[in-house]
Image (tube, helix red, strand yellow):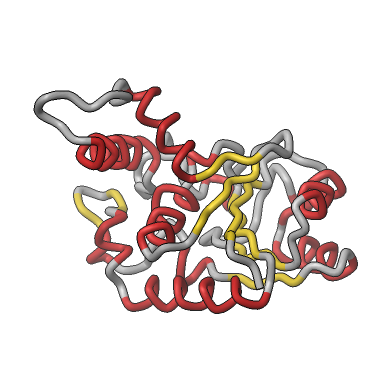
């Protein structure tokens, strides 16, 4: 049983290096939260070869992209052509995915996997990780160099990047964090017609 949930982005790692990162942190299972678990640029992370390599390494694999992916098929989760994380987080399917993650974390040392290198560029942090932290789970993000960044530290980094590092007379810490979430979501959330939206980009072109 693990008290901490991890996240990781496969980025452009060689498969052996990626598995090395998983072993470094003692992971025993991966939950793939990509909406479409394929990558033209990095085919080693296509679902089938990845699952086979993980099995050989003694690491379990489950696909949760339908439940927890960023590219919702529910039209009610969109506004002005872009996914709205708050709406997606309220769907029964997403809540089902969260429950499966929570149950899995009781039996495995588990990491959520998506494509993006930086946790702040990915819904695994801004959507799934945020929801799990709100439910009381500890979340640690595995960085490309093998280092760890707690979810709280990731949020501090995001606030600093967006100019919301310090509360003031008019805004509390919680309000500034919520504002930072919303601004970053607007930058990365999936929009079918917007090729600059990055979230889940790894599935269909990264």
Residue 153 is situated, as x and y percent measured from the top left of the image, at 48, 36
Question: Which of these two is toward me, 84 or 26?
Answer: 26
Picture mark count: 0
Going by the picture, which residue comes out furthest to the left? 170
Question: In screen coordinates, is 138 left or right of 85?
Answer: right
Give the image location of residue 147, x and y in percent: 69, 37
- Height in image: 166 above or below 73? above
Name the spot of residue 132 as percent of width and height, x first: 43, 62
Question: With 76 as the anchor, is 153 left or right in this view?
Answer: right
Q: Residue at x 35, y 36 (%)?
A: 184
Quarter holding the C terminus?
top right
| Residue at image point 24% right, 42% down | 174
Residue 170, by quadrant, is top left
Q: Which image quarter holds the N terminus? A: bottom right
Residue in the image at 41% along x and 63% along y? 136
Find residue 66 and report its horizontal and vertical position in percent. Answer: 48, 71
Tell me if residue 76 comes above or below residue 198 in the rendering. Answer: below
Q: Which residue is located at x 46 percent, y 77 percent?
A: 99
């Amino acid at each position: 049983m693990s008290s901490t949930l991890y996240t990781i982005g496969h980025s452009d790692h060689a498969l052996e290096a990626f598995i090395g990162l998983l072993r470094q942190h003692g992971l025993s299972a991966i939950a793939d939260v990509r909406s479409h678990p394929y990558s033209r640029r990095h085919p080693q992370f296509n679902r089938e070869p990845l699952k086979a390599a993980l099995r050989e390494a003694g690491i379990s694999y489950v696909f949760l992209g339908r439940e927890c992916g960023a590219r919702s098929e529910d039209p009610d989760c969109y506004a002005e052509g872009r996914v709205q994380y708050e709406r997606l987080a309220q769907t029964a399917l997403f809540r089902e995915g969260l429950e499966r993650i929570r149950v899995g974390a009781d039996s495995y040392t588990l990491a959520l996997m998506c494509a993006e290198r930086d946790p702040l560029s990915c819904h695994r942090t801004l959507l799934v990780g945020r929801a799990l932290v709100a439910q009381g789970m500890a979340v640690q993000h595995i960085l490309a160099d093998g280092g760890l960044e707690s979810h709280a530290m990731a949020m501090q980094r995001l606030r600093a990047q967006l100019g919301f590092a310090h509360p003031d007379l008019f805004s509390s810490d919680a309000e500034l964090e919520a504002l930072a979430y919303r601004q970053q979501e607007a930058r990365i959330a999936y929009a079918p017609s917007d090729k600059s939206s990055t979230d889940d980009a790894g599935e269909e072109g990264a």
